[in-house]
Amino acid sequence: GQQVMQIPQYQHVQEGEDFTTYCNSSTTLSNIQWYKQRPGGHPVFLIQLVKSGEVKKQKRLTFQFGEAKKNSSLHITATQTTDVGTYFCAGPGDNNDMRFGAGTRLTVKP
Amino acid sequence: DAEITQSPRHKITETGRQVTLACHQTWNHNNMFWYRQDLGHGLRLIHYSYGVQDTNKGEVSDGYSVSRSNTEDLPLTLESAASSQTSVYFCASRGQGAYGYTFGSGTRLTVV
């Protein structure tokens, strides 16, 4: 079945630095979703990308979907302590269920 | 306000016991999912349902079962709990035509 691989597993940054997490699939994805999970919390849906080469922004967060629709990235500009958490990408499985990557845990040092 | 609730929030059980985790949503969503979360593995799909009387196996379904007798509930049963099933369990739902999943707050299950 479809799997999405996510790197890095951990990222520690100084507040104000940028952060990027990457998601890769061996197969073409019809769409990709991104979620954020705060420590001790539950995943919260951030965005869905559908089109080849699509770029979407949410304040300091920039989401990209690759031209071949096999990879995606989430970039955070000038991280803040409120950005702490684990970021997951997810792609559709064989039956339109979503399969999640292992996540990137972001810590931010004030 | 509509919500998705899981109960209990925490549970400790013994190996071999049957355990049922509850998931109840008031969004009137047809699509419901159960995931387990373990360090290094992210969220792995256990079972899912696209409507009443519909259930499907996910990628890690062995030792688990679900039933869907109404729209609101998708209970997850561990037939005979094993230590390898110690995990955090999340229920999620999604409306028809919607994009993202709405997750419950999770159940932390410890099997001793």
Image: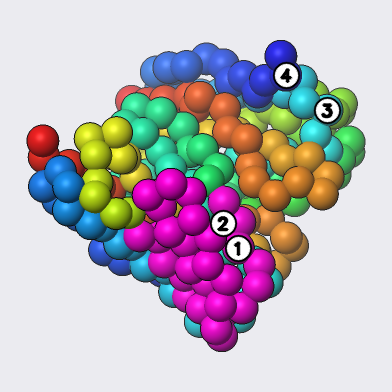
Q: Chain of mark 1?
A: A
Left or right of A1? Residue B41 is left
Specify whether B65 is left or right of B52.
Answer: left
Mark 3 surroundings: few (<14), some (14-19) or many (≥20) residues within 10 A: some
Q: Earlier in the sequence, mark 3 or mark 4?
A: 4
Q: Which residue is mark 3?
A: B28
B58 or B77, nearer to the observer? B58
User: Looking at the image, is mark 1 or mark 2 nearer the viewer?
Assistant: 1
Dot 3 amino acid type: Asn
Determine crowd level at label 4: few under 14, some 14-19, many 20+ residues with C-alpha closer than 10 A.
Answer: few
- Point out the stretch of residues depicted in magenta: A47-75
**Kind of residue at disc 1:** Leu
Q: Are marks 1 and 2 in contact (CB under 8 Å)?
A: yes
| Amino acid, disc 2 | Gln
The picture places residue B90, in percent across and down from the top left corner, at 53, 34
Where's residue B55, x and y in %? 79, 45
**Same chain shared by disc 4 and disc 2:** no
Q: The disc numbered 2 marks a residue on which chain? A: A
